[in-house]
Image (cartoon, rainbow, N blue to C red):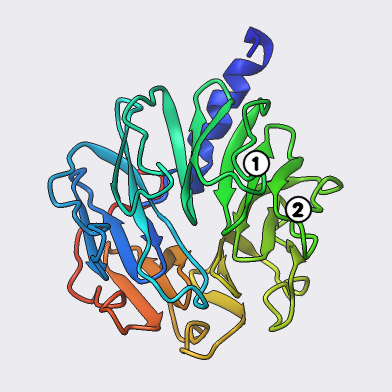
Amino acid sequence: MNSEIRDPYEEILKQKRWSKNTIAAGRRHTVGLKSDGTVTAVGDNKYGQCDVSGWRDMVAVAAGNVHMATNTGNAHSIGLKSDGTVAAVGWNKHDQCHVNDWSDIVAVAAGWRRTIGLKSDGSVVAVGRNNEGECNVSGWHDMVAVAAGDWHTIGLKLDGTVTAVGNNRYSQCNVRDWRGIVAVEAGYLHTVGLKSNGTAMAVGQNKVGQCDVCGWRGIVAIAAGSKHTIGLKSDGTVAAVGWNEYGQCNVSDWRDIVAVAAGCAHTIGLKSDGTVVAVGDNEYGQCDVSGWRGIQLPGN
C-alpha cells in the first residue's frame, strides 16, 4: 500500500470498533475476550472449540459458525494476539485452524470450515474450505474489514465499497454497487452492510425476513446469524429481524448494549459494564453467559 493512503487507512482501522470483536457466537458456542487479554468460552466443546483458557494477550476473537441444518458441532475459535499473530482451536478437517504462520494480522473472521485474516497493509489471507471460491481473496487490497458466511466471504474496502467471493446462489455476493459502507456481516446465505448514515442494507436469501433492514435508523453496529440479523442502535437498544424459532430475535428489552454477535440460532449482547446477555438456542449452554464479567469493550 502506498504512503498516500496508508495513514488514513491506519486511522480508519483505529476507528472501526467492529474490527476488534470482543464477543463471538458460533454454531453452538460463545467466546468472550476479557479486558486482561484472556478469553472465555461456553457451549459445545466436542472439537475443543472452547479450549481457550490458556490464551493470553488477545485483542479480538472470532467463532466459526454453521447452519442449523448441519447437525454437527464442527466449529472452531480464533484469537488475534496483540503482536498480530493468530491462535486457533477446534475442528480442523479443512485446515481452517492452520494459522500459526500468520503475522501482521489486524482483524479475523471465522466462517464454516475456514478462517479469514485481514493484514495491516489491507491485504487478506484465508485458509480452509474453498470448494466455491470462498477463500479466493489473495488479490484483495485496501481492505478495512472482512466477514465470513457459510460459503461466501465479504470484504469492505477503504473507499466504502464492498467485494465478495464464494457461493452466490441467492445473490448474497451482489454487493458491487454498494457505497458508503462502514461495516459488513455475512450470514448463512445473506450479507448485511451498515452505511455511514446509520442505515442498513442486505442482499441474499430472505425467506424469513433476515434481509428486511431497510427501515432501520441510527444503527452503529450489525451482526448476522444463520438466518437472522441484528442491529445495534446508537442509544444502546437492539433491533432484530429474521428467523426467531429459538427466540434469538427477542432483544427488544435489551438496554445499554455496546456490541452484538449472532450465532446460528442465538444472539449475544455486550453491555457497557462488561457483562453479557444472551437469547436463543441454549441446548449446549452457549447462552450461559450471565456470570461473565470484565469482557473487553469494543474500541478499548
Residue at point 58% right, 44% down? 130
Q: Nearer the viewer, residue 115 or 104?
A: 115
Q: Quadrant of the N terminus?
A: top right
Secondary structure of residue under mark 2: loop
Q: In the rendered image, which residue does mark 1 sit on?
A: 155
Tell me if mark 2 has few (under 14), some (14-19) or many (20+) residues whose alpha carbon lies within 10 angstroms of its own: many
Quadrant housing residue 280: bottom left
Q: Is residue 113 above or below residue 124?
A: below
Q: Is residue 279 above or below residue 124?
A: below
Q: Position of residue 107 (x, y in %)?
A: 46, 38
Q: Earlier in the sequence, mark 1 or mark 2?
A: 1
In the picture, the disc for residue 197 is none
What amino acid type is highlighted by mark number 1? Answer: Gly
Q: Position of residue 164 (x, y in %)?
A: 71, 45
Quadrant housing residue 87: top left
Q: Nearer the viewer, residue 23 or 294?
A: 23
Q: Position of residue 217 (x, y in %)?
A: 70, 68
Residue at point 40% right, 64% down? 25
Q: In the rendered image, which residue does mark 2 sit on?
A: 173
Q: Is residue 227 above or below residue 6?
A: below
What amino acid type is highlighted by mark number 2? Answer: Cys
